[in-house]
Image: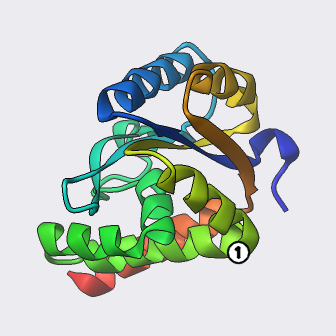
Amino acid sequence: MPDMSDALYLAVASYDSADAAERHFEAVKTAYAGQDTSHDFDAAVIAKDAKGKVEVVKRYEAPVHHGASHGLKWGLAVGAVTALFPAVGIFGALAAGGSGGAILGALSGHVQRGVGRNDLKELGEVLDSGEAGLVVVYTDSLADEVAASLQGARRWLAKPANIEREELANDLKETAASSS
């Protein structure tokens, strides 16, 4: 069990437009940049297209920017999106080619195991209530900043995510190695 100060959380927020979600995305990213915290921070903006298909339109993965997940194209926020909206993983994997689908599957699996089924359902309902959304994975040290940054969203909700970082990192490395 991780130390509570290192516990990960998954927050989602729904918006009437991608522009509104992107403004809060920037606010959350700025809050993260202003902290002396771990690199456990990911965020993604999603939006529905004219046919209702959900797409990731913007993302930020701190471990990727800090070298911890060198070579990976996605972080836990995109993994959470694929756990909540499995079709996003399918389209993302097709766009990425190669080991993309396997890596998205590994990320999604860890999110599904780390967040309870009822919590995933609630988080999905929040995202589904808007035309756009924001998904943030963060540590407890950013909880107040994330909550403040999400004020003004149509709806938002945060849940604990019991995701073991070492196990995730090892699984992702193995998946990437076996898929290449």
Where does the image place residue 173, in percent across and percent down from the top left?
A: 41, 71
Dot 1: within a 10 Å radius of its alpha carbon, few (fewer than 14), some, or many (20 or more) residues?
A: few
Q: Is residue 116 visible?
A: no
Under mark 1, the amino acid is Arg
Up/down of 79 relative to 46, above or below = below
Which residue has dot 1 on it?
A: 117
> What is the quadrant of the N terminus in the image?
bottom right
Identify the residue at horizontal 31%, vertical 27% (top origin): 19
- Residue nearest the viewer, comparing 119 with 39: 119
Which of the 4 image quarters holds residue 17?
A: top left
- Residue nearest the viewer, comparing 82 with 2: 82
Identify the residue at horizontal 43%, vertical 28% (top origin): 25
Up/down of 170 relative to 58, above or below = below
Identify the residue at horizontal 54%, vertical 39% (top origin): 41
Q: Is residue 79 visible?
A: yes
Identify the residue at horizontal 44%, vertical 43% (top origin): 133
Where does the image place residue 15, in percent across and percent down from the top left?
A: 45, 36
Up/down of 139 relative to 180, above or below = above
Where does the image place residue 103, in percent across and percent down from the top left?
A: 36, 73
- Residue nearest the viewer, comparing 172 with 75: 75
Q: Residue 145 vs residue 176: left or right?
A: right
Up/down of 74 relative to 38, above or below = below
> What is the quadrant of the C terminus in the image?
bottom left
What kind of colouring is applied to the model shown?
rainbow
Q: Residue 137 vs residue 128: left or right?
A: right
Where does the image place residue 26, in percent across and percent down from the top left?
A: 41, 21
